[in-house]
Image (cartoon, helix red, strand yellow):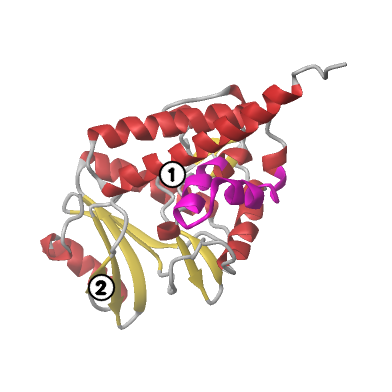
């Protein structure tokens, strides 16, 4: 749960002010991985600051810090500085100025995302103890294993269109997996942005990793992901959970009623 910037100890705000030259903070509107997340401006510029105090929050932010430092690529915001004081871990990230990506059909931001996916698909996972597919998703398949860096949460809230290109933020759930896993996890976000399941798959089919995975593997992924989010939505009233249950369910229904029917028809011997 997010904490208000004003609740930070004076030792923390003073350290931030010394680095930035002020502490005019605007809280982030989305995300919940860090207890504090805000755009902070001072005379020395603007930095996106995340801070954590709880045991879980510190572990999560420390993981994100390690991954962000290791990635250090064209699409990942740089780590400007970090420190610990008064029981808080505080990290200053490069501020990304721009709107969140529009992933609706026909949006030019889809081209930017496609370029980023191509880069990620060639990026080896850094040796910083990333999540496994099972640890990240709660389910697994042998084909999910791999050595690629997978962000796993490329929703619009984590995609910022800046004058310098698309920036991918919030690496708190980075995973070491096969590159197609990134694409499969993107399907619900495309559906939530207005794509049909067929449109989402057609767009993803432009990526080589999509064609390299067996359709039955995608069936398995879609089914297990839909089952997971349906269960979560039944136990929690959060709107975003219901949305993900809806979007993952739409994709699984599409694959079940379309691809499985086609494959069954292909197995029927032709009549003579």
Q: Residue at x 60, y 64 (%)?
A: 112
Image-quadrant location for residue 83: bottom left
The image position of residue 113, as x and y in percent, is 58, 59
State which mark lies toward you, 2 or 1: 1
Image-quadrant location for residue 9: bottom left
Q: Residue at x 44, y 37 (%)?
A: 249
Q: Is residue 193 magenta?
A: yes
Q: Which residues are magenta?
A: 184-208
Q: Residue furthest front?
A: 272
Q: Residue furthest right?
A: 272
Task: Give the labeled residue for mark 2.
Answer: 18
Q: Residue at x 55, y 26 (%)?
A: 220
**Front position in the image: 80 or 260:** 260
**Front position in the image: 70 or 115:** 115
Magenta region's main secondary structure? Answer: helix
Residue 144 in sight in this render:
no
Is disc 1 surrounded by few (<14), some (14 to 19) or many (20+) residues within 10 Å? many
Q: In the image, is 190 to the left or to the right of 90?
A: right
Is disc 2 surrounded by few (<14), some (14 to 19) or many (20+) residues within 10 Å? few
Tag of residue 71: none
The image position of residue 100, as x and y in percent, is 44, 66
**Front position in the image: 186 or 125:** 186
Tag of residue 247: 1
The quarter of the picture where the C terminus appears is top right
**Front position in the image: 13 or 39:** 39
Tell me the CA gap for discs 2 and 1: 45 Å
Label 1's element?
Answer: helix
The image position of residue 80, as x and y in percent, is 41, 64
Where is 31 relative to 134, above or below?
below
């Amino acid at each position: 749960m997010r904490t208000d910037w004003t609740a930070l100890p004076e030792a923390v705000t003073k350290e931030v002010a010394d680095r930035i030259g002020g502490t005019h903070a605007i809280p982030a509107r989305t995300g919940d991985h860090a207890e504090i997340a805000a755009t902070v401006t001072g005379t020395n510029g603007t930095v996106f600051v995340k801070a954590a105090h709880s045991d879980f929050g510190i572990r999560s932010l420390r993981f994100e810090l390690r991954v962000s430092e290791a990635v250090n690529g064209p699409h990942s915001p740089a780590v400007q500085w970090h420190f610990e004081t008064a029981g808080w871990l505080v990290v200053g990230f490069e501020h990304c100025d721009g709107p969140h990506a529009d992933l609706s059909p026909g949006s030019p931001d889809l081209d930017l995302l496609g370029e980023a996916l191509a880069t990620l698909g060639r990026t080896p996972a850094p040796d910083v103890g990333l999540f496994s597919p099972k640890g990240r998703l709660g389910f697994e398949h042998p084909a999910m294993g791999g050595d690629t860096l997978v962000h796993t949460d490329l929703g619009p809230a984590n995609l910022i269109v800046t004058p310098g290109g698309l920036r991918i933020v919030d690496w708190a759930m980075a995973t070491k997996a096969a590159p197609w896993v990134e694409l499969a996890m993107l399907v619900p976000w495309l559906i939530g942005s207005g794509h049909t399941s067929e449109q989402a798959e057609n767009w993803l089919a432009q990526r080589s990793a999509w064609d390299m995975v067996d359709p039955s593997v995608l069936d398995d992924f879609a089914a297990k992901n839909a089952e997971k989010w349906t269960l979560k939505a039944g136990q929690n009233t959060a709107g975003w959970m219901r949305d993900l249950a809806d979007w993952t369910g739409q994709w699984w229904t599409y694959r079940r009623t379309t691809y499985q029917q086609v494959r069954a028809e292909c197995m029927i011997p032709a009549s003579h």
